[in-house]
Amino acid sequence: MKRVSVFLYGVASYVIFFASFLYAIGFIGNLWVPKTMDSGPVMPFWSALGINVLLLGLFAVQHSLMARPFFKRWFTRFIPEPAERSTYVLLSSLCLIVLFYYWQPMGGVVWSIENTVGQAIMYSFYAFGWVLLLVATFLINHFDLFGLRQVWLYLNKKEYTHLEFDTPWLYKYVRHPLYVGWFVIFWATPQMTITHLLFALATSAYIIIAVFLEEKDLVDHHGQKYIDYQAQVPKYIPRLSKSPTAVAEATSK
């Protein structure tokens, strides 16, 4: 019964994540959903700024703290280890939902593209960012990243094994294609409001800090193999002249 419960918990956590993921497409892009980043009444600037900074801070602290190895070791003293990743995914999703609900528009326009072709180009980049993000998750095992592999193995009484270090396709050109996708999503908009600018600046800064912490953990876990990978492959901007074969050879040593 415990194994079934953990599995159902993992599936439910993933469903909530995927719903928040789909809503985020509309929220950030000001498309389709009932409440978007720039919709709703505008409250006094400083009040809106304070609320939005607190919401972004809540997500950043939860997302980074729970990803650290020391926290995972502590947390799995209280919950089944196979449910740890699903819990991380669930709480991240709930923080996003809170952000969606309480986010406050702040008014003001930094840039606005009125040309139809220009708008289409920006929305194309926006869509590309989401596709890149999703593809990047599947390249490194989408189901492990979001906790489903862990609970499935537990259900079937199989031991969980950590994924081997690998550099599939996009990861041969850039170390963090998933985060590159996020950068594109945050900045590709035909109308950049002050609200959107705050969101883009804060989330971009968070990613840079998170990548720094994540790479320290990866070096601790993979050792020289990841250090060689760092030397061969750029962090965010692809070095397209670099041979993927050479990168693959370097990272397989």
Image (cartoon, rainbow, N blue to C red):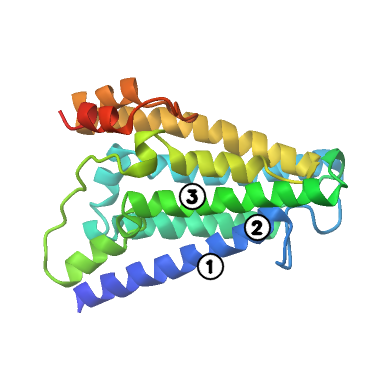
Task: Say which quadrant the C terminus sits in.
Answer: top left
Q: Percent x, y for residue 222?
A: 21, 32
Residue with the mark numbered 3: 133
Identify which residue, 90 or 119, lies in the foreground.
119
CA–CA distance in space, label 1 to label 3: 16 Å
Identify which residue, 29 or 151, lies in the foreground.
29
| Residue ID at (22%, 56%) | 81
Q: Residue furthest bottom?
A: 1
Res 104 seen here: no
Task: Note whether 206 is above or below 129 in the view shown.
Answer: above
Q: Which mark is residue 248?
A: none
Earlier residue among tags 1 and 2: 1
**What residue type is disc 3 on?**
Leu
Q: Residues within 10 Å of mark 1 (few under 14, many from 20)?
A: few
**What residue type is disc 1 on?**
Ala
Residue with the mark numbered 1: 19
Judged by depth in the image, the label closer to the viewer, 3 or 2, is 3
CA–CA distance in space, label 3 to label 2: 20 Å
Residue with the mark numbered 2: 100
Q: Residues within 10 Å of mark 3 (few under 14, many from 20)?
A: many
Q: Quadrant of residue 204?
A: top right
Q: Percent x, y for residue 80?
A: 23, 60
